[in-house]
Amino acid sequence: MVTRVFSGIQPTGTLHIGNYFGAVRNWAVMQNDVDCIICIVDYHSITADVDPKTLRQASLDMAIDLIASGIDPEKTILFVQSDVPQHTELCWILGCVTSFGDLSRMTQFKDKSSKEAFVSSGLFTYPVLQAADILLYLADGVPIGEDQVQHLELSRRVARRFNSRFGEMFPEPEPVVGKKGARIMSLSDPTAKMSKSAGESHYVGVMEPENSIRKKVRSAVTDMGPEAGDAMSPGISNLFEILELSTEATGKTGLVEELRSEFAGGALMYSKLKDTVFEQLMEVLRPIQQRRAELEASGDVIDMLRSGADKARAIATKTMAQVRSLVGLGTDSD
RNA sequence: AGGCCCGUAGCUCAAUUGGAAGAGCGUCCGACUCCAAAUCGGAAGGCUGGGGGUUCGAGCCCUCCCGGGCCUGCCA
């Protein structure tokens, strides 16, 4: 039984609905049952070429988005990674029990590094920092999607190797699968996962203005039109996915059945599907956007993050004292 | 520390001997579509990495700086 879960999210400035339905919404449920630690991972962000002038604001914006989306800082420890520098200390130590070969085999690294002219060693050791993030809090569960299984495997391997070399310290973190593998795809390229980096037309921001969301949903890629008995194309299936997730929250699940049977009969008008998706989605997003406006105006979030960092640091300090002692570092003999 | 190569639109790259900065893809707008896609029409986008120099004239030549790639060497 998992008792403490750790999740990281990069400060990209703002959430998109893929983040929301795929991850954040599950975290908001989980925080009622287990210890939940959510970290805005700015150390990870600087592996890419981010603008130092906007990084802090991006972290703050991400925090506001998360809280507006239902993360309760009273229940969840929510903080910014670099406010707890123990992440990097543990990262170094774990790096020394991580094999070069294992890191070289990471597909995400191979993928990204082949596209970039400048490849930092930080990008290479990124998965070690991820392991440090998780193990620093002795988390035994990590909610992840398909694309992160290889990295979590590495975290487990690193934990095991540390334990056998220095002594029993870290639990091996298990993957936690959400109740439903919500995986929202890009609107422009429904064969790829929704992401901001692919471009404007690919994602819908949780905090985007209504008219912009309408436009994006309306221009989502579809297909030549349904015929009775056809299988759904990726684009249509994605729109149904968004509709399903939205109506789960709005309670209008009947709409899904209705449109599904129209599709099965080959009579579904895609413009109607899109309008329905837009309306239901907005019903979910409007209250979140409302809360965001209030939070931003209150200016309270910065204090919430500081108190989150205090709680995180308390755990991290304790872990590091044990780690330092096990490894034989420093001069303190606790 | 040394040697060699590179830097032009968001991306990939052109530009004759030193002679008016371009194409493809992408982006945005429009037409066609139930909506999209494809197609067609239109538009935006640049201190040619930066400074200095030579020249009537520099993306191109010289020089320094910045950034990047490859190779050799050195080192806690």
Image: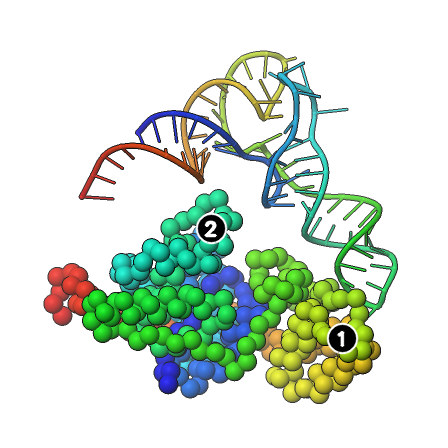
Is label 1 in a helix, a strand or a loop? loop
As drawn, A29 above or below B76: below
Q: Which chain does the numbered disc 2 sit on?
A: A
As drawn, A298 above or below A250: above
Q: Callout 2, which amino acid?
A: Ser
| Residue at the disc numbered 2 | A113
Q: Which chain does the numbered disc 1 sit on?
A: A
Identify the residue at image location x=35%, y=70%: A156
Is B49 on the left or on the right of A334, as rendered?
right
Sort mark 1 into few (<14), some (14-19) or many (20+) by Cα contacts within 10 Å. few
As drawn, A4 above or below B47: below
Residue A230's disc number = 1
Residue A152 appears in the picture as rendered: yes
Q: Are marks 1 and 2 on the same chain?
A: yes
Is A201 on the left or on the right of A262, as rendered?
left
Q: Callout 1, which amino acid?
A: Asp
The one nearer the camera, A75 or A155, is: A155
